[in-house]
Image (tube, grey):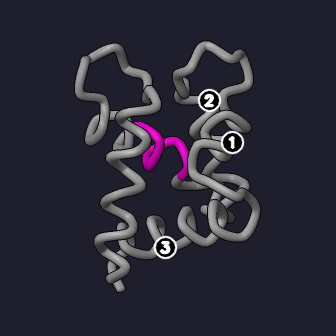
Amino acid sequence: MTTEESILNKIQILITNHFSTPEMAFNFFDENNDHKLTKSEIVKLLKEAEISGFIRGIVSSKLIEGYDKNGDELIDWQEFKAAIAKIKKSDS
């Protein structure tokens, strides 16, 4: 399992085990209720997913880089859903 697959797997486990839906997870980590996840909110999600502190900052930047389609350096609900869809697809 690659590092990326391992990280995606840990995120999926977090969402599956602690939230009824991905939207509930998104809303939980969206601390300021602006309907977007900031880098710091993503870092908290990664911490909860037990991603090593050493790589959380790198991973959060890569997630934003890979899924931020509108270029605002935030992850909105549609972008989050796309990331979750990739996680589910890679798990199949």
Number of labelled discs? 3
Residue 44 is marked as 1
Q: Position of residue 89 (x, y in %)?
A: 29, 70
Residue flagged by tag 2: what amino acid is it?
Answer: Ser
- Residue tagged by mark 2? 40
Circle 2 crowding by C-alpha within 10 Å: few under 14, some 14–19, many from 20: some
Looking at the image, which residue is at 26% across and 41% down?
66
Give how far apart the Cα atoms at labels 1 and 3 are. 16 Å
Quadrant in which residue 44 is drawn:
top right
Q: Position of residue 57 (x, y in %)?
A: 52, 42
The residue tagged 3 is 9
Q: Amino acid at mark 3?
A: Asn
Hey, which residue is sitting farthest front in the picture? 20
For the record, the magenta segment spans 56-61
Q: Nearer the viewer, mark 2 or mark 3?
A: 3
- Inspect the image, locate mark 1, and give the three-letter code of the amino acid beneath it: Lys
Q: Is residue 36 left or right of residue 46?
A: left
